[in-house]
Amino acid sequence: MKYEILRVSRCVRHKPISRVGLLWLLLVLGCRADSGAPVVLEFWAMGREGEIVQRLVPEFERRNPGVRVRVQQIPWSAAHEKLLTAFVGDVMPDVFQAGNTWIPEFVALGAIEPLEERIGRSAVVTADDYFPGILDTNVIDGSTYGVPWYVDTRLIFYRTDVLAQVGYPRPPTTWNSWLEAMARIREHVGHRNFAVLLPMTEWQMPVILALQRGASLLRDGDQYGNFRSPQFREAFAFYLDLFQRGLAPPTGEAQVANLYQDFASGYFSIYVSGPWNIGEFSRRLPPSVADKWSTAPMPSPDGDPPGVSTAGGASLAIFRSSGHKDAAWKLIEYLSEPAQQGEFYLLTGDLPSRKTAWTSRALVGNRYAQAFWVQLQHVRATPKIPEWERIASKVSQYAEAAIRGRMTVDEALTALDGDVDSLLEKRRWLLRRAARES
């Protein structure tokens, strides 16, 4: 305090000042001094991305000397709950990373700032440079709430040598041709091995097949399950048939001793997975099969390749009550630049959400990534409602029951619709109340 009084007295040239006046002047000067302090952005990023993105922050701060970014890395396993807890406690970060399927939930809570106007004015974030199906995951009721940061989807990883040995030097493109190829593989590798690994704990495969058949997973404004529709039933039966024919082992991924070792040994020759496995396959497969695998887009039912797949990845969003929205948007624009997207890919292996970032030599020269380039132009969002995560777990639950013979197809789909209708009961009540009040 002595120093502060001396500093103020020098500023007023030793003129007499009352105690009240001195206190008032201290407050004013203190506010003026603080006004020159940098804006500190709180940015929550998940998993390894939270660690790696910190390497990109210094360049952003150099370009924006009045802004500092404080990155908090959060494990994916705790991220969803931590964000919800932060929202309830009103301690959300200014900018945060969210899985694309989380966006509807945080929109329903009123936690995310709409970005439509900012995107419209931006010279950096241009909507037509994003994969349409991926961008659509961020659009709720006509408004855009997130900017895709990186993308993923699911497609086929396969043993090129095994498929060639059974008469398929190129990967099949239709459901029927894949069935034939898998039947030949099973005969070729022997009955202790299988053609394809489809972990029963994953909901993605039956949903992908249903989307390819044009199924609407929910009906009546996403208020009821629609899993007994002819389109979903046909896709579900096709999925179950892969197990009933002995083409896929009735197991979960966790029960496979070593995914990469089993792929190399021929226990299975086909695996539906995402871009993270490009790096994992490259690192973990033994030298004997290092050049005997590749990737391919999903087949389609009718031979008009490729078939659609799910739209995944993560987006960047701004907390609606942030006091630094302009600075937060600058950070999102910076991380969305094609150059930063390319650098982020080199550091993490996460595929860029910007099409222009795919012109980099690292991606153009990566033959495994090129199938993802094709597939990402044929993806669809799952239902954009907060309850989707719980609905998805029900899909895998009843798929496993049908695979193990505990339920018939019709019993499983009837029970699935019943459970989903119960999960959506509150949604129906809220929509009815909103309709009465409008």
Image (spheres, helix red, strand yellow):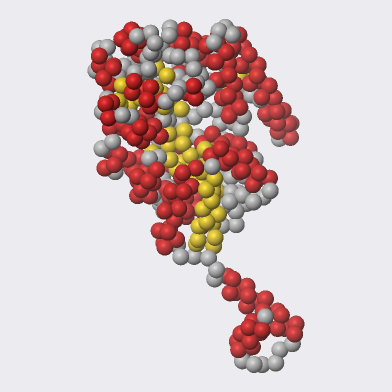
The N terminus lies in quadrant: bottom right
| 9 left or right, relative to 69 | right
Residue drawn 59% across the image and 21% down it: 394
Q: Position of residue 251 (x, y in %)?
A: 49, 17
Residue 162, quarter of the rendered image: top left
Residue 271, compared with residue 377, is above or below; it is above
Residue at 57%, 47% (x, y): give it. Answer: 113
Q: Is residue 285 left or right of residue 430?
A: left
Q: Note whether 264 is above or below 82 in the view shown.
A: above
Question: Observer-nearest residue: 158 or 254?
Answer: 254
Q: From this viewpoint, is residue 297 visible?
A: no
- The number of callouts visible is 0
Q: Taking 269 as reference, is 124 above or below it?
A: below
Which percent across, then down, holds residue 110?
63, 43
Residue 187 visible to an observer of this rendering: yes
Residue 342, percent across and down?
Answer: 35, 46
Residue found at x 37% / y 33%: 280
Residue in front for this viewpoint, 40 or 104: 40
Q: Quadrant of the C terminus?
A: top right
In percent of width and height, residue 169 lies at: 24, 18
Residue at 59% in and 8% down = 407
Nearer to me, 40 or 308: 40
